[in-house]
Amino acid sequence: MAGEWILTVTAQTPTNIAVIKYWGKRDESLILPVNDSISVTLDPEHLCTTTTVAVSPSFEQDRMWLNGEEISLSGGRFQSCLREIRARATDVENKEKGIKISKKDWEKLHLHIASFNNFPTAAGLASSAAGLACLVFALGKLMNVKEDHSQLSAIARQGSGSACRSLYGGFVKWIMGKEENGSDSLAVQLADEKHWDELVIIIAVVSSRQKETSSTSGMRESVETSLLLQHRAKEVVPKRILKMEEAIQNRDFASFAGLTCADSNQFHAVCLDTCPPIFYMNDTSHRIISCVEKWNRSEEAPQIAYTFDAGPNAVLIARNRKAASLLLQRLLYYFPPSADTNMNSYVLGDKSILKDAGIQGIDDVEALPPPPEIKDKIAAQKNRGEVSYFICTRPGRGPVVLSDESQALIDPKTGLPK
Amino acid sequence: MAGEWILTVTAQTPTNIAVIKYWGKRDESLILPVNDSISVTLDPEHLCTTTTVAVSPSFEQDRMWLNGEEISLSGGRFQSCLREIRARATDVENKEKGIKISKKDWEKLHLHIASFNNFPTAAGLASSAAGLACLVFALGKLMNVKEDHSQLSAIARQGSGSACRSLYGGFVKWIMGKEENGSDSLAVQLADEKHWDELVIIIAVVSSRQKETSSTSGMRESVETSLLLQHRAKEVVPKRILKMEEAIQNRDFASFAGLTCADSNQFHAVCLDTCPPIFYMNDTSHRIISCVEKWNRSEEAPQIAYTFDAGPNAVLIARNRKAASLLLQRLLYYFPPSADTNMNSYVLGDKSILKDAGIQGIDDVEALPPPPEIKDKIAAQKNRGEVSYFICTRPGRGPVVLSDESQALIDPKTGLPK
């Protein structure tokens, strides 16, 4: 360790959406949950965080930039992750660059971290989950940490609970664990993304002027005041976890959808049972649920599962591409874009679903007939402008290292964001 | 019993609003609930049903008119009430009119019934509770039924569950009972309306274009699918009932408000936990809750309790007149009337509250400053047109007979609605 070298690692980590929800901590500082949860990892092509971590003897302090803006690293959650990862650092040697860092050097070396979300950060799309997971994963690679993904997930968990589920692709379970120190509260992969590759996911980003309760304070208030939360955690969720694992194993969409919808609704029920009550869903969310429920009930088997996190956005999981294109038609019928929005910025992500739905431009949206399951005029009403945009995606892979230096977010010469 | 005489009785019965909610039956046909409930009776001056029941040997069949329109009496619930009341009929003698009806005559005699609500029937203001209670009460008087109000309440219960609570004024408990035949599932008065006469009630009738789930089918679906309902009924409500009785006895508004709000929210949480989920509250309901919660938390003690039944309307109970006028200012600030609405049809009922609030016309509404507890612009936004109108009222008396014949709804000569 000498000279003015800079060593970097760049990684990409997905977001995830819980289908059996995490709501309530039994330990605030270690972030230990009151129940297991299960999530689907979303394709990083459409929703992911990219993070470059850099180390150099010339850095005078730890610094971090998010989407180009410098942010503070002083928060307890960042510090927990940095401390835990540093404690597991091992010897690093880069012969090409002539760099040698010994295990004990890591305590003195400072880090520069640059992170970027390929989706709006504040839109309630689990940016903190992907972000903390990516930070831990990238630092693990940089510092040659030998722990496996599950062990890294227990570190990411201390940054943001649901971040632990972003350490794997496909279908992931966060085991609540029993230990007081949280060492067994970690994520495991139930199945990879290829196991059930028919699924298509459409996210409706809902316009909202409400200021939302943060999930951290919301779940604290639920634990303190809801008389239903403990019953849910102890009596309801354990059975659902077993059934959900089975549904995923068997690619049983009817069970998967039934459990996903019921658990999303129950999580929001617990929020409503909190004092003061927490409302994350709004009238638009309710209308999306009503659209899906009516369609599912008009078919022999459910076509769509819906789930909502701590905000009004809907995450809709279609059983296959055909169902996804029929869903997109329904969504565009009920929620046409505002006059000043073009289709290209209204449906993002995998645009082939839009093509399957036979929609090329705004005229095709205006020409959509009411869904056949709708019998009355009130139910057929349109709600222009209530959705900001849609994102079409699918279950996706876990974290990866991006070895192409052009994808790094930090300039390897200056050590600052590009 | 002879000749073409017509005998009538006219009665007036209040509506009631539950502060510990009834949601879920353990017996569908007898209407037996899964838990006790407690309600406040609303002043019949502002919200009541008036019913005239008439009997005559000239009537060829049982007939009923609601708000001037003839309606069918064939429903099982009407029939249950008619059957139960007829079974308890006794000898009636009206010397003035020279009428004698013996106990056994009642089986052959037909009835004409005319009923009128002094408030919009379909606005979700418990019109069926007042209506069924009034029918049973008026028939009981006509047929000289000897049963007391509690025993009558068990008959009204078979028409519409919450109707049983409209047989008393003030504060009323519906005891769920244990008997299979429902004989002990009836209402008792906890305290009359004079016991706590400081309370003022403001109802916000919320505009809605949604078609709502009827409470009958909604609670059936909750019983069948909600995994939280039984826990609520068995573990949560019994404790709340005891605390609520105590709060009412002690006129302890802080406890009363805390229990009322929490129980309303928990009832809606159970609705949300139903499959498919039931949404009775909408964004306007949420905004009203948020307004009350913010204000309550900014004061040393709660000023207002809120509760919502199976619809978006808010029932707001103010601790006293002062709090009610401050509440009305807030409500009018957030929910000013549409441009084409005048104040006189926007605030109904006890208009002295409006006067206390210093509001004489629309100009006074437009001049209202944001509530002092509001710190940010988003929270201070106005929502014009979201409320159809307000009704100012108070806890009120139970059913009464109206002896003034001019108030009868049936012409004593023709036997038909006036």
Image (cartoon, coloured by chain):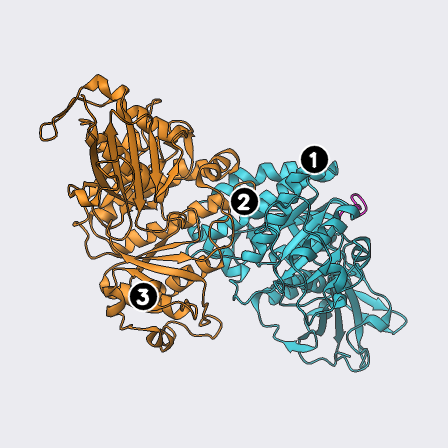
Chain colours: A cyan, B orange
At x 22% / y 36%, what residue is drawn?
B413
* Lower sequence index among marks 3 and 2: 2
The boundaries of the magenta stretch are A192-199
Q: The disc labelled 2 sits on which kind of residue?
A: Pro
Disc 2 is placed on an element classified as loop
Q: Chain of mark 2?
A: B
Principal SS element in the magenta part? loop
Against B227, is A172 above or below?
below
Would you say residue A310 is visible in this rendering? no
Q: Residue farthest to the left? A: B95
Disc 1 from disc 3: Cα separation: 53 Å
Tell me if mark 2 has few (under 14), some (14-19) or many (20+) residues whose alpha carbon lies within 10 angstroms of its own. many
Disc 2 from disc 1: Cα separation: 20 Å
At x 38% / y 70%, what residue is drawn?
B333
- Callout in the foreground (1, 3): 3
Task: Determine whether, in the image, residue B110 is placed left or right of residue B71.
Answer: left
Q: Which dot marks residue B344? A: 3
Of B8 and A213, the residue lying toward us: B8
Task: Determine whether, in the image, residue A277 is placed left or right of residue B134.
Answer: right
- Magenta-colored stretch includes residue A375: no
**Which residue position holds label 2?**
B277
Tell me if mark 1 has few (under 14), some (14-19) or many (20+) residues whose alpha carbon lies within 10 angstroms of its own. few
| Count of residue discs | 3
Q: The disc labelled 1 sits on which kind of residue?
A: Glu
Would you say residue B317 is visible in this rendering? yes
Q: Chain of mark 3?
A: B
Q: Residue B363, image x and y in percent?
A: 35, 77
